[in-house]
Amino acid sequence: MVKKVAESFESAITELEQIIQHIEVDQIDLDHALNQYKHGMELVKFCQDKLRDVEQKIKILDQETNQLKDFNAE
């Protein structure tokens, strides 16, 4: 059975923050740092894929309603 990289976008971000803190603060050996980096890159890809999926769903919803609007983050 293949282990999921993360359960959710939020959990992936939290885990990425922990990895960064662990690498920056703790003195870890090179092999462990490399493994943490690899896992971090898997989490980054997971987050990018999730964001891409949400963006696609938003585009589909906008097309269905025929009301494509600019996104305002404020």
Image (tube, grey):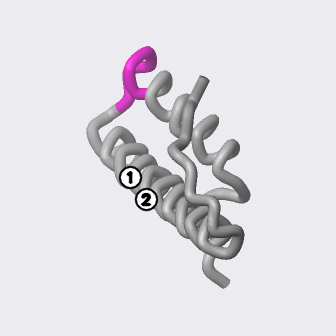
SS of the residue under disc 1: helix
Residue 63 in the figure: left or right of residue 10:
left
Quickly name the residue at label 1. 41
- Magenta run includes residue 24: yes
* Along the viewing direction, whichever of 58 and 30 lies nearer the viewer: 58
Above or below, 69 against 23 in this view is: below
**Viewer can see residue 66:** yes
Are discs 2 and 1 less than 8 Å apart at CB? yes
**Viewer can see residue 18:** no
| Residue located at (42% from left, 44% from top) | 36
Q: How many marks?
A: 2
| Residue located at (58% from left, 40% from top) | 13
For the magenta stretch, what is the residue range?
23-28
The percent position of residue 27, horizontal first and vertical second, equals 38, 20
Quickly name the residue at label 2. 45
Task: Point out the frontmost of discs 2 and 1.
Answer: 2
